[in-house]
Amino acid sequence: MEHTLFVVVITIAIATLFNVFLKKIKIPTIIGYILSGIIIATLFRFDASAKETLSHVAEFGVVFLMFTIGLEFSIKHFRKMKREVFVYGMLQVGITGILFSTMSYMLFDANAKTSLVIGLALALSSTAIVLKVLNENNETHSGYGRIALGVLLFQDLAVIPILLMISIFTSNDQSLTSLLGELLISAAIVFAVFFVASKYVIERYFGWIMSTKSEEIFLVSVLLVVISTSFFAESLGFSYSLGAFLAGMVLAETKFRYKIEADLVPFRDILLGIFFVTIGMQINWQSMLEYGHIILFLVIGIMFLKAMVIFGLLSFFVQKRSALKATLALFQVGEFALVIFTLAYSNGMINDKWNQILVITVVISMIIAPFILKNIKDIVDFFSPEPTTLRKRAFREGGFSGHIIICGYGPLGRKLAYNFKAMGLYYIILEHEISLVDKAIADGEKMIFLANAAQKRVLEHFNIKESVAVVIAITNEKQKRLICENVTSIDANINTVVTVSNDEEEKIIKELGVKHIVNDREIISQMLAQKALTCSLRV
């Protein structure tokens, strides 16, 4: 136990030091976590069972990531993405998988079954890295972001038949018909349970939880839903992440989606950090030095060929810039390939030498990916400059632009919404009290969201940088200060309007960098004075 805690402390210390330094030079934190994993594995030399335990814990980072992505994409939204998922995704996995399978058969001296497994694994991209960076850049709903997400969702679905394929190729006591039959029955059970839950259980369950008015109980209940749905899907032969994604999609249909997403972000990011540390732990320095020339050739060759296939495919369907951005987002190899190679190795399909070479190749491609994603616009602008066109201020495909954000739906918030509606202005309301949200919906408000504006992630989700103004219409001083701090930390030039009740509060808010402050007492005293003078003049 003492040794374990010592390892944890050292890991956190190294990861913190790396990430503070890397953040200052604008290098993604993912790299810091992976480098920390490499150092920790070198210092402590974990055995196979310890690495397996860590990988199971780390997998929940991907689980929470997929859950929050599911929250972004409701069932209605998913239906709109049929083209991205089932056309782009299927073609990408199919064409890339066939190409790499053929090359594996020729280069690795492997049999047809092993080559097929290797080829399909290399066709997969990193869901964890791509979606994390897209979320950080607020580009999940952008044109190329939707394409990348659609392809990644299909790839995650494709993992199931690939893993099943390994079972079929290495199984001696179970027929193909029985394996496929079990898969179809399991799929029917999963979708039936999620359908019933979405229609009859989830809304009532969270309504009951919210009646306690306890943030702690609400958060625990969300964790319960995420973990239990993941376990349920895994017990029926699917991946943890698929179960979490379906649970997210179910909850996306409810009014609790934004509150849940904001509350879970810290857990997701911490667990994702652990996931990337375990990725770094899989690099064997001796194998890297011994087979360095082969690994370098494979990294360059795989990423180049994958990019050519994805760009060539997408060019038939979307604009050149979107195709290029999606290509740069997807041309690395992902974490599920590591899962597939591990299973193939344990079943004797891949020998130790090629397992190490392939694992290190995948990890290096994952290390390269964040640098590309962070600078994707500059890279694309170099090859294909963006045309200068007038952008419309509109709400489309889940994105927000040219809007007014009203924080709070109390008496003042309601009056503001009424006035903005009368003037034909585009506004949205953020309110964390469920009774007020229900009242707003009953009043006919369509653009109200159950979300806590005091959380930075919520403000970023509603694209605060592109808003016309942010009006903070709440009375709670602590919440008011938190919102102001988050707004100014995102962009000090955002047009923020705040009401305060006294001079002391006005001074505090002004120190936070807010320029438009309305002092209630001052305004009321001026109005009273005017009324008093009017009365005296009439007398």
Image: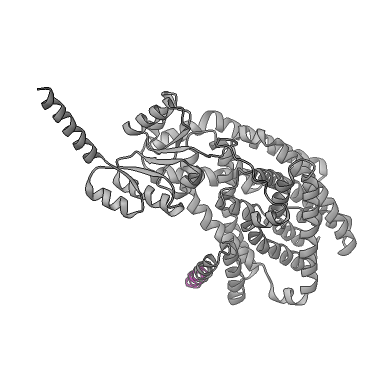
Q: Is residue 49 visible?
A: no
Rendered location of residue 385, percent (x, y): 69, 51
**In the rendered view, does 184 fall on the left or right side of 273?**
right
Q: Is residue 209 visible?
A: yes
Q: Nearer the viewer, residue 53 or 138?
A: 138
**In the rendered view, does 183 fall on the left or right side of 224?**
right
**Majority secondary structure of magenta residues:** helix
Rendered location of residue 90, percent (x, y): 77, 43
Q: Residue at x 57, y 41 (%)?
A: 72
Residue 408 highlighted magenta (yes or no) = no
Quadrant of residue 283 in the image?
bottom right
Residue 12 highlighted magenta (yes or no) = yes
Rendered location of residue 153, percent (x, y): 68, 44
Q: Nearer the viewer, residue 490 or 445?
A: 490
Q: Is residue 223 above or below residue 43?
A: above
Q: Nearer the viewer, residue 258 or 396?
A: 396
Residue lying furthest left in this view? 539
Rendered location of residue 516, percent (x, y): 34, 45
Q: Residue at x 65, y 57 (%)?
A: 378
The number of numbered badges drawn on the structure is 0
**In the rendered view, does 335 fall on the left or right side of 108?**
left
Q: Nearer the viewer, residue 282 or 257?
A: 257
Q: Residue at x 34, y 54 (%)?
A: 512
**In the rendered view, does 403 fall on the left or right side of 157?**
left
The stretch in magenta equals 2-13
